[in-house]
Image (cartoon, rainbow, N blue to C red):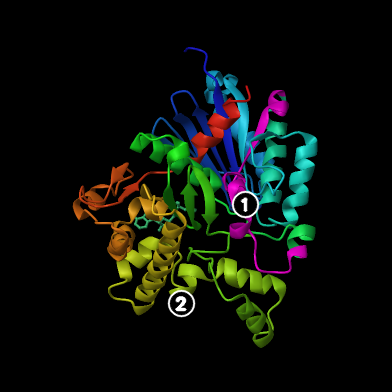
């Protein structure tokens, strides 16, 4: 086996840890997996090596450090050469604030800054920092080779008119209240791949990237840079998501808080955990497959689908205007964007006014995670499906440090 420089990519949530060992040269993920239900009695871990999947329970209430220890001591002992060839660790960090937009070595002082930013991203940054510390314990010889790649980073180019809320300006100046945008690693990958696909330089690319997964966001990219995006101060703003409401009238929350006597936590749970597709289907499901299977026979699923498409089309229309009529492409990605011919069809049928003409055969063929054009050859503008690959972006950035 020739000497390789593998990167371990880690993406930590509050109760989960996704990992992938990536070869940034040939862009292959050699081994990947997910530890979930961490800190709960049913903690478990699954992983895939060369197409073969395995799963096992972790000790009850295992934490992130336990999960990483299992990866190094149980899984990787079977692949000693692979373990030895991990040269650095790349972490997905949700919030870099205004200070961190570029990939950064996670020194103790950077970690202190990121912990302080937990005030802006209480659901995400503490888990990310926990993941970094756990990785430093599990791979002590790589302690100085932990690199953070920020989900807010790609949106650092938003102009003030896009990132400012019309609140007293002192709130921005004193407390950093502004729109930051998220899913930046995915939107960057999609822009990079689209430029490659269209044989254009990234700096010349004008496009709209639709990342539609459980979380969903859309980004207007002008001359290769993010100029507007639908998520804001938190990942709750914008599109309809699995359990997040996306845009609502802000005064509505004050009304509901008073009327239903909701606590701050209950109000947060309402818009983050009980809304979106889950809320519109009257609590039936946050999963888009459920909507797809039932919209013809269930009025709530039909409503959820209608609101979902309406919001998405509205954003695409307004972002097309921001691109000064230089739209090279719309790209769909994420679990829904890559797999739902229904969503792509309904969206593109509404966009004939912008010069899009759907090719339904191509749309159906693009269903199985294949890159592909889904508009006709006569269409004035093109739409594509491109599977996202955030791990690869993190691995490549991390490799650039070693
Ligand atoms: P996450 O944001 O958690 O990474 P994903 O990008 O994996 O989420 O997307 C999950 C969403 O993709 C779910 O709503 C799921 O129902 C949807 N999805 C996956 N496959 C299909 C499919 N074949 N048709 C419609 N929706 C799908």
Queried on whether the Cβ of the residue with tag 1 lies below 8 angstroms from ligand 1, the answer reads: no
The residue nearer to you, when weighing 14 against 398, is 398
* Residue occupying the point 73% across, 57% down: 176
* Residue occupying the point 39% across, 40% down: 194
Queried on whether the Cβ of the residue with tag 2 lies below 8 angstroms from ligand 1, the answer reads: no
Q: Is residue 22 magenta?
A: no
Given the current orientation, which residue lies at the most extreme bottom position?
259
Ligand 1 is in which quadrant of the figure? Answer: bottom left
Bin the neighbour count of mark 1 within 10 Å (Cα to Cα): few under 14, some 14-19, many 20 and up.
some
Residue 15, which numbered label? 1
Residue 282, which numbered label? 2
Magenta range is 141-170
Residue 171 x %, y %: 76, 64
Q: CA distance from mark 2 to mark 1?
A: 26 Å
Residue 344 x %, y %: 32, 58
Residue 86, which numbered label? none
Residue 61 drawn above or below residue 78: below
The residue nearer to you, when weighing 255 against 143, is 255
The residue nearer to you, when weighing 347 against 65, is 347
In the displayed structure image, the side of residue 133 where residue 365 appears, left or right: left
* Residue occupying the point 70% across, 57% down: 122
């Amino acid at each position: 086996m020739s000497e390789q420089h593998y990167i371990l990519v880690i993406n930590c949530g509050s109760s989960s840890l996704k990992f992938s060992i990536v070869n940034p040269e040939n862009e292959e993920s050699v081994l990947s997996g997910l530890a979930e239900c961490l800190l709960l009695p049913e903690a478990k871990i699954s992983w895939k090596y060369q197409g073969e999947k395995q799963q096992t329970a972790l000790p009850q209430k295992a934490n992130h450090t336990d999960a990483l220890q299992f990866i190094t001591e149980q899984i990787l002992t079977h692949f000693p050469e692979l373990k030895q060839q991990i040269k650095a660790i790349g972490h997905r960090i949700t919030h870099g604030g205004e200070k961190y937009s570029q990939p950064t070595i996670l020194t103790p002082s950077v970690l202190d800054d990121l912990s302080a930013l937990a005030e802006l991203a209480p659901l995400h940054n503490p888990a990310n920092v926990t993941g970094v510390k756990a990785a430093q314990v599990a791979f002590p010889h790589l302690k100085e080779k932990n690199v953070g790649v920020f989900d807010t980073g790609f949106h650092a180019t938003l102009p003030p008119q896009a990132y400012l809320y019309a609140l007293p300006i002192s709130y921005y100046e004193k407390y950093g209240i502004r729109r930051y945008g998220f899913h930046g690693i995915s939107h960057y990958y999609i822009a990079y791949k689209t430029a490659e696909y269209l044989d254009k330089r990234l700096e010349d690319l004008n496009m709209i990237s639709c990342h539609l997964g459980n979380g969903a966001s859309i980004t207007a990219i002008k001359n290769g840079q993010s100029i507007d995006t639908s998520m804001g101060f938190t990942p709750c703003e914008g599109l309809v998501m699995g359990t997040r409401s996306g845009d609502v009238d802000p005064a509505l929350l004050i009304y509901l808080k008073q009327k239903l006597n909701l606590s701050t936590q209950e109000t947060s749970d309402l818009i983050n955990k009980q809304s979106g597709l889950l809320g519109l289907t009257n609590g039936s499901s946050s999963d888009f497959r459920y909507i797809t299977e039932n919209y013809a026979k269930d009025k709530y699923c039909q409503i959820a689908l209608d609101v979902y498409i309406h919001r998405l089309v509205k954003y695409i229309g307004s972002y097309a205007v921001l691109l000064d009529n230089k739209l090279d492409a719309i790209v769909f990605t994420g679990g829904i964007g890559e797999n739902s011919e229904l969503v792509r069809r309904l969206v593109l049928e509404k966009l004939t006014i912008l010069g899009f003409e759907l090719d339904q055969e191509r749309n159906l063929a693009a269903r199985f995670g294949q890159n592909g054009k889904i508009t006709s050859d006569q269409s004035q503008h093109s739409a594509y499906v491109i599977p996202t690959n955030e791990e690869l972006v993190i691995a490549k950035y991390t490799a650039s440090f070693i």
